[in-house]
Image (cartoon, helix red, strand yellow):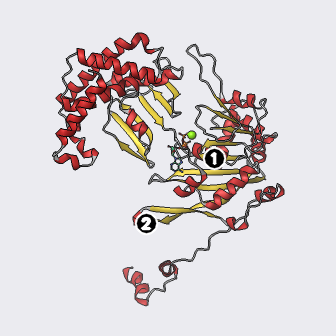
């Protein structure tokens, strides 16, 4: 009997067994509880069975595995499973057998317990600290999961499978590596001796449907006014730097900003690990390369920026500047490749500037600080600061214009600033508001025929609550109160 037929019978048995079962009306998570609550002995038995069958599948498939992929591989693995389950004595109850087969197929073809998390659209990041310690991020917050790899061996096999698929390797001599899943998700793996307590795998999931400006407005990350200004700035070829901490949404904001680039332009993207998803028809994606096992063949972001200048770019988008490429990027922005966009890891617009200065110094030229600042000031027009709030929301906290140099100091002027407000139900709230100052870049945009309505820069009129006024009004102390300290003395 074929496995598919067997599964149909088992499904029918399962359905009959669950009819009249009070658990049938429970939500799926509650129905799974008996399996989750398996005794340790039961779990060991289950895992041992899975190990045995998986090893046999691998043994049978090994000679043909490399030549197969996609549906052909899936078909062969299912057939091998069919044969092995008929031949071997696998002690799994008929009710659990369906789950057993499903997990086996998942383990043999996919990424084991990561598969359901990869398919779950509410999960944005997956973090494995150990084979049985898997965390996910949902709506900006971390949650532990009850999924686990069978053991450390399976965990390592999955890491190796992911890494080797992009032609890289992970072992003691190269214990940290960046990779990508076939769907584009960004993967980082690091193993001992660098990770003290075992291998750690971090997956930033790839949005099947990348966020658009309207999504960021809906999430409260942007306001409509900000979207209008940013669109005008990108169309008007101003150079914009997105600044923020780890995982605050720099790449996402950069991607949305680049969606404003007009279709006719040739865009070159340069990244360490390709994440940007530009929708324009004329885009060239370049990806840096780490050195090989012999320490050779490295291609740095810096090399790619230099090379891109010979590729007739209209715009250069660098995923993130981390080092000496900052100098090349500033020079490109200053020499006719305006409208370039990039991100930097920094905590405020001012901090972003000092990070840039440090990175320019990394290029190894003994440039005086003033010369570097002059470069920065003439290259950069706008800095957009993104942040993650304690409740997981990602927001733009400042949009700042780089106005010029006064003496040795770079003049920064906030155009929009995030204002903290008491939120609903005791939760923190806030909004991005205009500071009321008309940025200089508007003149430049107007000279290009790009109009930005003046109202977007108008600061909101804040009428204080009567209770606030009451708090602020000076209170005259009573004669009795005034006398109190005297008496104390
Ligand atoms: N405005 C937003 N609202 C909700 N989720 C967001 C928002 N921006 C980004 N995200 C989600 O946050 C996660 C991190 O985003 P992103 O990769 O853009 O951050 P990053 O700052 O580039 O991170 P890193 O420093 O690791 O490169 C992603 O899963 C993304 O989908
Ligand atoms: Mg990023």
Specify few, some or many for label 2: CA neighbours under 10 Å numbering under 14, 14-19, or 20 or more.
few
- The residue tagged with tag 1: helix, strand or loop? strand
Residue 199, quarter of the rendered image: top left
Give whichever of discs 1 and 2 has the lower sequence position.
1
How far apart are the two marked residues, 1 and 2, measured between alpha carbons? 29 Å
x then y, percent, for residue 196: 39, 27
Q: Is 97 above or below relative to 459?
A: above
**What residue is at 45 percent from the left and 34 percent from the top?**
202
x then y, percent, for residue 241: 67, 46
Q: Which mark is residue 242?
A: 1
**What residue is at 81 percent from the left and 59 percent from the top?**
446
Q: Is 415 above or below relative to 319?
A: below
Which quadrant is home to the N terminus? Answer: top left
Residue 60, quarter of the rendered image: top left
> Mark 2 — residue?
424
Residue 150 makes an appearance in the image: no
Question: Is residue 469 rendered to the left or right of residue 156?
Answer: right
Residue 121 or 287: which is nearer the viewer? 121
Q: Residue furthest right?
A: 447
**What residue is at 19 percent from the left and 29 percent from the top?**
94
Which quadrant is home to the C terminus? Answer: bottom left
**What residue is at 44 percent from the left and 43 percent from the top?**
121
Specify few, some or many for label 1: CA neighbours under 10 Å numbering under 14, 14-19, or 20 or more.
many
Residue 321, quarter of the rendered image: top right
Question: Is residue 66 rendered to the left or right of residue 258?
Answer: left
Question: Is residue 90 rendered to the left or right of residue 415?
Answer: left
x then y, percent, for residue 460: 62, 70
- The residue tagged with tag 2: helix, strand or loop? helix
């Amino acid at each position: 009997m074929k496995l598919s037929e067997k599964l149909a019978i088992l499904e029918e048995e399962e359905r009959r067994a669950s009819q009249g079962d009070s658990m049938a009306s429970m939500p799926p998570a509650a129905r799974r509880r008996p399996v989750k609550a398996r005794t340790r002995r039961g779990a060991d038995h289950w895992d041992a069975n899975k190990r045995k069958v998986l090893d046999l599948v691998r043994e049978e498939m090994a000679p043909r595995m490399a030549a197969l992929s996609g549906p052909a591989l899936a078909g062969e693995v299912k057939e091998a499973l069919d044969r092995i389950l008929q031949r071997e004595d696998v002690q799994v109850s008929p009710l659990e057998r369906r789950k057993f087969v499903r997990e086996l197929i998942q383990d043999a073809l996919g990424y084991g317990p990561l598969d359901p998390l990869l398919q779950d659209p509410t999960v944005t990041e997956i973090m494995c600290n150990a084979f049985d310690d898997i965390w996910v991020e949902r709506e900006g917050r971390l949650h532990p999961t009850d999924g686990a790899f069978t053991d450390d061996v399976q965990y390592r096999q999955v890491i190796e499978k992911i890494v080797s698929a992009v032609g890289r390797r992970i072992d003691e001599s190269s214990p940290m590596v960046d990779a990508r899943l076939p769907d584009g998700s960004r993967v980082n793996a690091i193993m001992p001796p660098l990770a003290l307590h075992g291998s750690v795998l971090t997956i930033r999931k790839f949005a099947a449907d990348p966020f658009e400006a309207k999504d960021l407005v809906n999430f409260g990350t942007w306001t409509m006014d900000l979207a209008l200004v940013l669109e005008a700035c990108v169309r008007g070829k101003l150079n914009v730097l997105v600044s923020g901490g780890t995982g605050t949404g720099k790449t996402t904001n950069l991607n949305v900003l680049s969606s404003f680039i007009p279709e006719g332009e040739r865009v070159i993207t340069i990244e360490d690990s390709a994440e940007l998803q530009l929708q324009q028809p004329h885009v060239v994606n370049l990806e840096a390369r780490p050195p090989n096992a012999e320490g050779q063949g490295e291609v740095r972001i810096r090399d790619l920026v230099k090379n891109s200048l010979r590729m007739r770019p209209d715009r250069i988008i660098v995923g993130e500047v981390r080092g000496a490429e900052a100098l090349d990027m500033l020079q490109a922005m200053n020499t006719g490749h305006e409208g370039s966009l990039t991100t930097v890891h920094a905590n405020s617009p001012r901090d972003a500037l000092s990070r840039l200065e440090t990175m320019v110094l990394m290029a190894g030229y003994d440039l005086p600080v003033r010369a570097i600042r002059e470069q920065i000031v003439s290259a950069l027009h706008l800095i957009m600061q993104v942040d993650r709030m304690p409740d997981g929301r990602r927001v733009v906290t400042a949009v700042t214009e780089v106005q010029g140099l006064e003496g040795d100091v770079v003049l920064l002027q906030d155009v929009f600033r995030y204002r903290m407000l008491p939120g609903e139900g005791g939760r923190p709230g806030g909004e991005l508001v205009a500071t009321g100052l008309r940025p200089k870049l508007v003149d430049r945009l107007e000279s290009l025929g790009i109009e930005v309505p003046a109202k977007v820069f108008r600061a909101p009129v804040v009428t204080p609550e009567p209770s606030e006024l009451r708090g602020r009004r000076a209170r005259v102390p009573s004669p009795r109160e005034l006398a109190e300290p005297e008496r104390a003395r």
